[in-house]
Amino acid sequence: MLIYNVFGRYLGVKKTPEGWQVFRAEMTERKFSRLYDIIIPDDMTEAEIPGWLGDIFHESATELHPDVWRIE
């Protein structure tokens, strides 16, 4: 699973035969809950995902958390 810090919120992204799946990630206990309302296009590459998440969640950007980046 790919783990991203999305403006201070942790999201997991996993490629499956059905396409990309997105999860809310609780990193302390490594628990993941599937999020069905966030869609990543099937043809999107791994390198494009941070930009896509940044576009979706840009309203969540703050001075303390201004970016999206992969942490795992």
Image (cartoon, grey):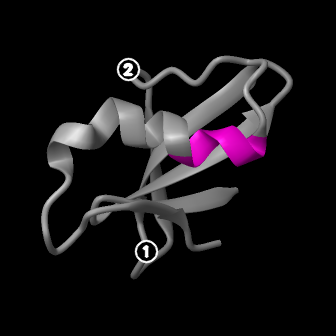
Q: Which mark is residue 37?
A: 2
Amino acid on which the number 1 mark rests in the picture: Met
| Predominant SS along the magenta part | helix
**Which residue is nearer to you in this view: 35 or 52?**
52
Mark 1 lies on residue: 27
Displayed quadrant of residue 37: top left
Range of residues picked out in magenta = 46-50
Vertical placement of residue 57 versus 72, above or below = above
**Which residue is nearer to you in this view: 24 or 5?**
5
Q: Which mark is residue 43?
A: none
Placement of the C terminus among the 4 image quadrants: bottom right
In the rendered image, the residue lying farthest to the right is: 17
Q: Is residue 2 left or right of residue 38?
A: right
Where residue 69 appears, as percent x and y from the top left, is: 51, 64
> Which mark is first along the chain, 1 or 2?
1
| Residue 48 covered by magenta stretch | yes
Where residue 48 appears, as percent x and y from the top left, is: 66, 39
| Residue 35 covered by magenta stretch | no
Local packing at callout 2 (Cα closer than 10 Å; few below 14, some 14-19, many 20+) is few
Q: Is residue 35 left or right of residue 52?
A: left
Report helix, strand or loop for mark 2. Answer: loop
Vertical placement of residue 14 versus 38, above or below = below
Amino acid on which the number 2 mark rests in the picture: Asp
Where residue 33 appears, as percent x and y from the top left, is: 43, 46
Q: In percent of the image, x 42 and y 25: which residue is there? A: 38
Placement of the N terminus among the 4 image quadrants: bottom right
Local packing at callout 1 (Cα closer than 10 Å; few below 14, some 14-19, many 20+) is few
Report helix, strand or loop for mark 1. Answer: loop
| Structural distance between the alpha carbons of marks 2 and 1 | 21 Å
Q: In percent of the image, x 43 and y 78: which residue is there? A: 29
Where residue 58 appears, as percent x and y from the top left, is: 26, 40
Q: Is residue 56 left or right of residue 41?
A: left
